[in-house]
Amino acid sequence: MYAYIVKRLLLMIPTLLGAAVLVFYLLRAVPGDPCEIRLAGTGLYADPAEIELCQKNLGLDRPLYVQFFEFVGGYFTGDLGDSMWTGRPITYEIGLRFQLSLQVAIMATIVSVLLAIPLGTISAIRQDTWIDYVVRAFSIAGIAIPSFWLGIMIILGLLIITQQWFGTPWMPPIDYVSPFEDPLANLSQLIWPAIATGYRYSAVATRMTRSAMLEVLREDYIRTARAKGLLEKLIINRHALKNAMLPVVTIISIEFAFLIGGLVVTEQVFNLNGLGKLFVDSVGAQDFNLTQQLAMLVVLIFIVTNFVVDLFYAWLDPRIRYA
């Protein structure tokens, strides 16, 4: 098992290096110049001398390979550089928003798992019954309904209910409150975007759980277990569900990694200043430094998530660790 872990860790290095090369050079291939955007303002013209001075201050006048090595070298020194737009350290810009995005992703994933695995399992066990039809309709609705639309409906519903019951309409909080400062205020702020997003992603996981369970329940070892007289509950929990979890874990892990920086519209609906909004703002301002660090953060999250999932695979199916 230790050899398998070391092998997976070593594979991260070329993956990160390849991603760094692509992110760095593809950003520079995009038309436009951050200094021109910064200096032009609302006008259509910026003084060439000022643009040249700005490029020199930002280090954009140096050769690309020098900028690339400085970009990669920052990971060894712990200095990720400063934002070209705000001038503040990138670690500060990301740190302000990472906790919020991570918490929303974790809460949405928990909602997704709590909905998907029980519903998918029940739907497979009760195939072609009214329970199966209800679960399938529930999952299809989740796939069809955008999470931001569901978020808007949740806000409107809360506005109407609180207005009628308490006389004061509820509004999404503007400022993020850490769970370590005020857990109740934090939960009241993030539970609704987590539910709206978690329901959307639970729909895909529910259908995957149902399909995987139906396939496993037709296997010979399940029929053998039933022929031996084992309890149905024991067969489902110990034999069927564990073997059906491999594709489900893959879907849930990909969704979790995407949620860290991909909730741009949902963040706008609930007034959340997360990584998704920061990503869009940095691209719009052509802030190369911030954009490439955010892109590498997403890459790192995907790589670490896949690593954890690989270890979980090895625990679910011991044959994997010896492959």
Image (spheres, rainbow, N blue to C red):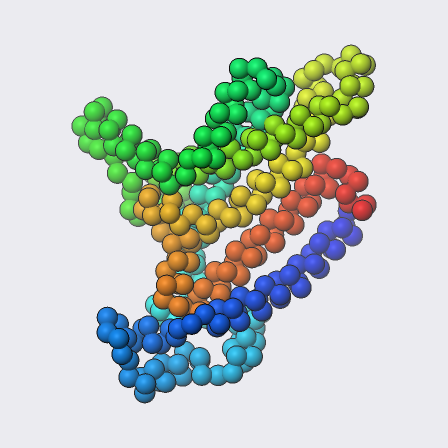
Note whether residue 279 is visible.
yes
Please tell me which residue is depicted at 37% across the width and 47% down the height of the picture: 265
Indicate left or right for 198 with 232 as reference: left
39, 113: nearer the viewer: 39
26, 193: nearer the viewer: 26
Q: Quadrant of residue 88?
A: bottom left
Q: Residue at x 70, y 15 (%)?
A: 232
Residue positioned 53% across, 71% down in the render? 25
Is residue 184 visible in the rendered image? The answer is no
Q: Is residue 293 left or right of residue 207?
A: left
Q: How many marks?
A: 0
Nearer the observer, 216 or 164:
216
Q: Position of residue 51 (x, y in %)?
A: 34, 82
Residue 78 at x, y percent in the picture: 53, 67
Position of residue 119 relative to residue 5, above or below, is above
State the image coordinates of residue 296 (x, y, percent, origin top left): 53, 61
